Image (spheres, rainbow, N blue to C red):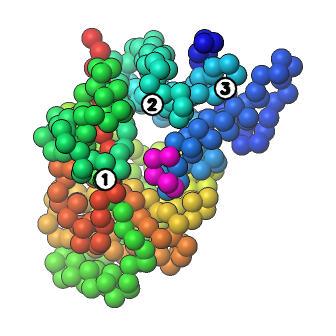
Amino acid sequence: MTALAITPVKIPPTPDAGTYVLDGSPDSATEFQECHALLEAHELEKWGNLDRCPTLLEDLEYWRGSEYEERHLFMARQGGDAVGMCSVTLPLRENTTTAGINVLVSTGYRRQGRGRRLLEYAEAVATARARTSLDAYCELPADTVERAGRLVPAKSGAGGLPADDPSVAFAAGCGYELEQVERASRLALPVPADQLEELESAARRRAGGGYAVVAWADKCPEWLVGEYAILRNRMTIDVPTAGLNWEAEDWDPARVRHEERANGRGGIQAQVAAALHESTGRLVAYTVLTWRAGVPASIIQQDTLVTAEHRGKKLGLLTKAANLRAAQERWPAARSVLTWNAVENQHMLAINTSLGFKPAGYEGEWQKRLG
């Protein structure tokens, strides 16, 4: 068997901007497209659709990295064939002892040691940058988890993953611990307008007076961007993270604007609804939905947060219902919304259930601590 060659993937300026190579090796655009094709094949094999998969343009923008996170992608070849890839992400502002690790081996090349080789390579890149906490994520279909016999329990105390699943066995066998399980949920669209109105009205009655829903598409209004940055910071503090070694992120207006520009370059559209506390002028809740033209039937539910001092007033439901109504008007081709919540976050899961979300998968959040 020929040796496995693992090499860095150069990120091209555009998806089709190739470079002429004299030795006949793949140019940067071709190699990047090969990586993306491996990812798409993996998603289709597991899910039968590309709802969770970034588009090529979105992937390209992501792998360019930013001043907030360095990102490295590596291709594995054997006998000239692309057989897998791995990646390392390195936060640069906070969590500077942490690295994100991902490994993918193509169908037909698995269970022969290539995954472990790729993992060892990625871990070596991370440790060379003094990273001592390695994070990895892998989602399984809901029926695979719900039909399983023995589960590996999450250290959070909520949820678990099938012990005999190859990805679970691989992670555990390589020294990673299952810190947390998130439930993926799917909402079929469209949600009837009268159902949204009823939920929104009930939420307004519970909230009482003093709150106004404000909304925007893609770019936060200048008069709210400072408040929005505060909420983004709170999201990294308040979201359940179990035992994951994760620090709060420092969000300011510049970071918000950076994300908005990156979304635009990557073809991501965003719809945001927030709750404004009228007497103080503070934003106290928000929720975000995103959509890509390359996957028009799928919307992704991103963050939802209600600040601690304003919880118990159904502001989460109020903003989610308002945002869903706006999203259905803006993206009429969408047929579902996907979202992820920690299994222990029963309050947010209850809100999603009231909107009609149903289980669609379970994602393991794995961690390996070194030293």
Rendering coords of residue 334 (x, y %) = 51, 70
Residue 271 visible, this orientation: yes
Q: Is residue 91 left or right of residue 75?
A: left
User: For the residue labelled by badge 2, is the local secondary structure a helix, a strand or a loop?
Assistant: strand
Residue bearing mark 1: 142
Rendering coords of residue 303 (x, y %) = 36, 55
Rendering coords of residue 222 (x, y %) = 49, 61
Give yes or no for residue 200 being in the magenta stretch: no
Residue type (three-letter) at the residue carrying disc 1: Ala
Residue bearing mark 3: 81
Q: Nearer the viewer, mark 2 or mark 1?
A: 1
Residue furthest to the bottom: 194
Sequence order check: which comes first, mark 2 or mark 1?
2
Quadrant placement of the N terminus = top right
Q: Nearer the viewer, mark 2 or mark 3?
A: 3
Q: Residue at x 39, y 56 (%)?
A: 302
On screen, residue 281 above or below 97: below
Q: Nearer the viewer, residue 322 or 151?
A: 151
User: For the residue labelled by badge 1, is the local secondary structure a helix, a strand or a loop?
Assistant: helix
Rendering coords of residue 190 (x, y %) = 43, 78
On screen, residue 42 above or below 302: above
Please rate how many residues cluster around mark 3, counting C-alpha atoms within 10 Å: few if below 14, some from 14 to 19, many from 20: few
Residue bearing mark 2: 102
Name the image quarter holding residue 134: top left
Q: Is residue 90 left or right of residue 27?
A: left
Q: Nearer the viewer, residue 139 or 70?
A: 139
Residue type (three-letter) at the residue carrying disc 3: Asp
| Extent of the magenta region | 45-49
On screen, residue 190 above or below 258: below
Instruction: Give how far apart the Cα atoms at labels 3 and 1 are.
Output: 33 Å
